[in-house]
Image (tube, rainbow, N blue to C red):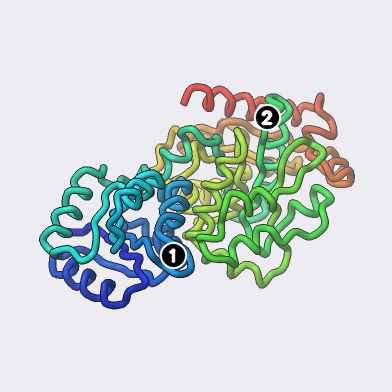
Amino acid sequence: MSERILIIDDDVDTLRLVGLMLQRQKYAVSAASNGAQGLEKALEERPDLILLDVMMPDMDGYEVARRLRKNPATDSIPILMFTAKTQLDDKVAGFEVGADDYLTKPTHPTELLSHVRALLSRSAPKKPEEMETLARGKNGYMVCVLSARAGLGVTTVAMNVAAALYAQTQEDVILAELTPGQGALSDELGFQPQTGLSDILRGTVAEVTREKVGSALVSHGSGVKVLAASENPRDVDLGAKIENFETLALRLSTLGRFVVLDLGSGLSSAAQRILNLCAERMVVMEGTANSIRHTRLLLDELISMKIDPKTVSVVLNNRQRSEAQIPWKQAQEQLNHPVLTALTPMPELFLQAARAHTPAVIAQPANMISQQFVKLADGILEREKAR
């Protein structure tokens, strides 16, 4: 058996005895001695079943169950409340906060095991698509923007696509720069240096609440709500907080109709996890032989991650006028993947927009390149409606 069971109980003897019994049955067992630790482990490990004690000093089992059910990452995990409370009202209270089954202490190991097996057999098996389906369903439509190498204009594309989406819909659009220590959005949009992303990543997974994420968003004059990365180089190490990133992305998906995620360059472990949550992925490249080759490698890796190539769009961003730039059709042939659009080189417009601390699509909405971003947004709107 490969099912994972998390036991949350402040009684050391229970943790030891029940844990040993389940391990003898070939279950993978982990333990938490209080409610806060249990919530953190549930988010990190995504167990197949949780055995939850009710009477704990810091946070009782009812509150733990409530928080598990409120979190989209844990709301489907079966909960077996395992407690010394025997009153009918206690059992009713347990079911009301989301418990799936209830056992009273002490119980015979055979009875406990039968309840564990029954719950596991009734619960749907976890699938790799589970988190992706969650993000695509009732929550916001997430678009990831990235590139194979740095310096290709990922932030510019993400920022202008987000602004164009808001201009088209007038609904909540979130732009999140998930590159700690390498932030550019604060400068681009005229914000004071931001620490919201870093604060979220430094905490525990259990602390990545919807409220905390919402309070870290800053409103911009374009209408977009922004989570900007810090500029402190030391914050790059926060890129290792994979579970925090994943939970953050899911929280963001509950706060807006559209969420545009700037993933920067490359395929970090966190980026790989987040890419599986997105409804579509936008890859930015330049019309040079090296950029096309690097992008081809990136696309191959995305396919190896079981990401549907149809959900991957390539944007050719020719930032400077140069005869060295490979034309759209030729770049597409070399890439062996459709190129969605080729952005017209217009450095003067982007310089003007940067000075005004606003996206180019807002600075000059009638400009040719602004209209190209609007078309990108229109395509996203069509795909969002068709999902």
Distance (Cα) linking label 1 and label 2: 37 Å
Q: Check disc 1 and report its element: helix, strand or loop.
A: helix
Residue drawn where x is 65% and y is 63% of the image: 198
Q: Nearer the viewer, mark 1 or mark 2?
A: 1
The residue identified by callout 2 is: 171
User: 381 or 42: which is nearer to us?
Assistant: 42
Amino acid type, residue under disc 1 in the picture = Gly
Q: Position of residue 314 (x, y in %)?
A: 55, 38
Instruction: Establish if 198 lies above or below 217.
Output: below
Amino acid type, residue under disc 2 in the picture = Glu
Residue drawn where x is 71% and y is 27% of the image: 170
User: Given the current orientation, which residue lies at the most extreme left position?
Assistant: 110
The residue identified by callout 1 is: 35
User: 47 or 85: which is nearer to us?
Assistant: 85
Instruction: Establish if 106 lies above or below 218.
Output: below
Q: Position of residue 261 (x, y in %)?
A: 60, 46
- First in sequence, mark 1 or 2: give its number: 1
Could you tell me if residue 282 is visible in this image?
A: no
Residue drawn where x is 69% and y is 69% of the image: 233
Q: Position of residue 228 (x, y in %)?
A: 70, 53
